[in-house]
Amino acid sequence: MKYYDGERDNAVYGWVRADAWQSWPAQLLTAYLASSVRIGIPQRLQSPLLAALMVAGVANHGQAETPLRNYIGKPLPEYVTGDECLFCHRNVVGPSWSINEHQKTLLPLIAAPEIEAALQANPALKPFAKHVRFVLGNENQIRLLRKSQKYGHLDLLSAILEPSHSEDATIKLRNKPPFQWDTKIFGQRCAGCHATAVDSRTQTYAATGIDCYSCHGDVDLKHANDASLVYLSKKRNDSPLLVAATCGQCHIRTGKSKASGFPYANNHVIGSDLFTDFDVDLSHKALDAAPPHERHILANIRNVLEENDSVTCLSCHNIHRTSGRKHRKIEKSNYCLICHAPSDMKQLTYNRKERHHALCGY
Ligand code: HEC
Ligand code: HEC
Ligand code: HEC
Ligand code: HEC
Ligand code: HEC
Ligand code: HEC
């Protein structure tokens, strides 16, 4: 695994990938076309570009993938909701889903009674309390939202709340009143990463919080008989590029969509290409400036895009077990020094409590 060893240092990443596609051998393309017939991909999707993208999967793992689609400027698919998924997946995923940070990121206020009580007790917030419907964040910062007059939109309250780590119903504010509702910020700067199936054209969302769809994509229910039909299943060997795009769509907090100008991915559906529209600065300079928790993400994305690294977010993070323990088994390299002291691996330079980001305002 490389880190900071890349020969090229380019600020914009679209070209690296286009470049890489062209270099893949033609016989792999043939292999893809053969395999796509076998797994029944419709004829109309077999364009040369898609074929080339498929080769990425073939080249990395000797196994084909479902082709990449692109939803920029098109309606997002009607996806199967988490409740429906959990009907069948209640044993393995169900128990941990309610504590998963992804699903908890934007909660209805009624699911956070301690905050509901605290709002009533705070004179500066009490006037807004009856309109608040959603709570954004929990560990680092808390923001409040109400339903907008515009359907499928949320308004963000300017108050910034400090999470209380004790049981009492007091709230500390990080900024001063007077507070007001903002009708645009959430849709234009936040929604894409804190809600599900956000359509950049209208900035409407399909569900608050992050649903299964955000990572597993537009799931075909036929996967119950053939688990390889669903992204990130054990039966697939999804390419590092697909993983980088899946997690990167939200965890790259310094990117920008060329088409929408928003800081979140434009109608990204898992399995489609992220980096042609989503510009991100992965130069040494940008990496050096980022604190460890951000740098390890950007450096991994860079390693995958530039070095074709097979280590991905999923080599270290286990989403449904909400654990990063398996990262200890990865081969040691410079990359580890983003968070560990060079002389002693037991000494950490990473502090979970010191996560900040200008985009999210904490
Ligand atoms: C590009 C995606 C992206 C955008 C856009 C974005 N966020 Fe975030 N946000 C994240 C990610 C990823 C995290 C979690 C990072 C971590 O845990 O290290 C986060 C964390 C947060 C948290 C802290 C959650 C906690 O645990 O306490 C809050 C609050 C937050 N964001 C608010 C906002 C607001 C408000 C906006 C819009 C102004 C916004 N975010 C825009 C991706 C995004
Ligand atoms: C933030 C991304 C993300 C979200 C959201 C998500 N998953 Fe997953 N899921 C993964 C990844 C990644 C894996 C592969 C195993 C791993 O590395 O954790 C996985 C694995 C699974 C598995 C295989 C069992 C296992 O533990 O390995 C099932 C079943 C599953 N997910 C169902 C769901 C359902 C149902 C939802 C919604 C309620 C959901 N997932 C939401 C990322 C996600
Ligand atoms: C009708 C029941 C049913 C529904 C609904 C359903 N699944 Fe599945 N799913 C299954 C079965 C059966 C399997 C294959 C057996 C297994 O591995 O659990 C499976 C497998 C999976 C796997 C691969 C598990 C592995 O071992 O890696 C994932 C991921 C997954 N489902 C996600 C989802 C998501 C996300 C949804 C909702 C969009 C969903 N499923 C809806 C029945 C269902
Ligand atoms: C749709 C946006 C989105 C996608 C896709 C997504 N994440 Fe997240 N992730 C978030 C947000 C937002 C948070 C912070 C939630 C909060 O604290 O409110 C988060 C939190 C996390 C955390 C911290 C959990 C904790 O226990 O503190 C990890 C680790 C993580 N994500 C890894 C991943 C990986 C790996 C993938 C790819 C499989 C992924 N995420 C995909 C938005 C996303
Ligand atoms: C070589 C292993 C490794 C890789 C690769 C990696 N991470 Fe991490 N990451 C970690 C470890 C270890 C932590 C600290 C976990 C902890 O605090 O217990 C962490 C922390 C995080 C956090 C902050 C929340 C937390 O739990 O502290 C987020 C969010 C995150 N990683 C997302 C990602 C994403 C997205 C990718 C892929 C682009 C990625 N990571 C790649 C090992 C890795
Ligand atoms: C994003 C930050 C981050 C990165 C990158 C990271 N680690 Fe860690 N590492 C942590 C944190 C936080 C802990 C303590 C929590 C835990 O055990 O998961 C830790 C703990 C460990 C431990 C246990 C140390 C002890 O006290 O016994 C080992 C071993 C380890 N990491 C190895 C690695 C290796 C090898 C790499 C590179 C492939 C790496 N880490 C990359 C954050 C990171």
Image (cartoon, grey):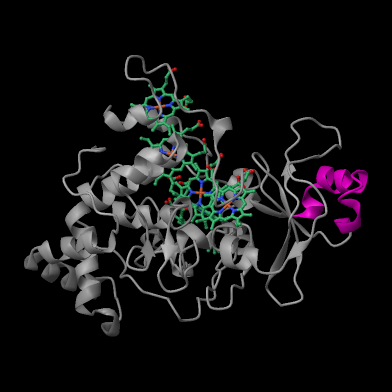
* Count of labels in the image: 0
- Above or below for 205 versus 341: below
Depth order, front residue of 255/286: 286
What's drawn in magenta, residue-wise? 108-129
Q: Which residue is painted at 34% across and 57% down in the image?
A: 242
* Residue 253 in the image, given as x and y percentages of width and height: 47, 52
Question: Can residue 279 be seen here?
Answer: yes
Depth order, front residue of 354/207: 354
- Above or below for 101 versus 131: above
Residue 291 horizontal side relative to residue 184, left or right: left
Q: What is the quadrant of residue 129 in the picture?
A: bottom right
Residue 318 horizontal side relative to residue 62, left or right: right
Q: Which residue is painted at 57% across and 59% down in the image?
A: 211
Depth order, front residue of 163/50: 163
> Is residue 114 highlighted in magenta?
yes
Residue 259 horizontal side relative to residue 321, left or right: left
Q: What is the quadrant of residue 149 in the picture?
A: bottom right
Q: Which residue is painted at 71% across and 69% down in the image?
A: 183
Question: Can residue 312 be seen here?
Answer: no
The chief SS type of the magenta part is helix
- Above or below for 23 versus 247: below
> Is residue 99 highlighted in magenta?
no
* Residue 301 in the image, given as x and y percentages of width and height: 33, 48
- Above or below for 192 versus 295: below
* Residue 76 in the image, given as x and y percentages of width and height: 50, 76
Residue 43 horizontal side relative to residue 231, left or right: left
User: Is the C terminus in the top left, top right, bottom left or bottom right quadrant?
Assistant: top right
Depth order, front residue of 332/131: 131
User: Is the N terminus in the top left, top right, bottom left or bottom right quadrant?
Assistant: top left
* Residue 254 in the image, given as x and y percentages of width and height: 44, 53
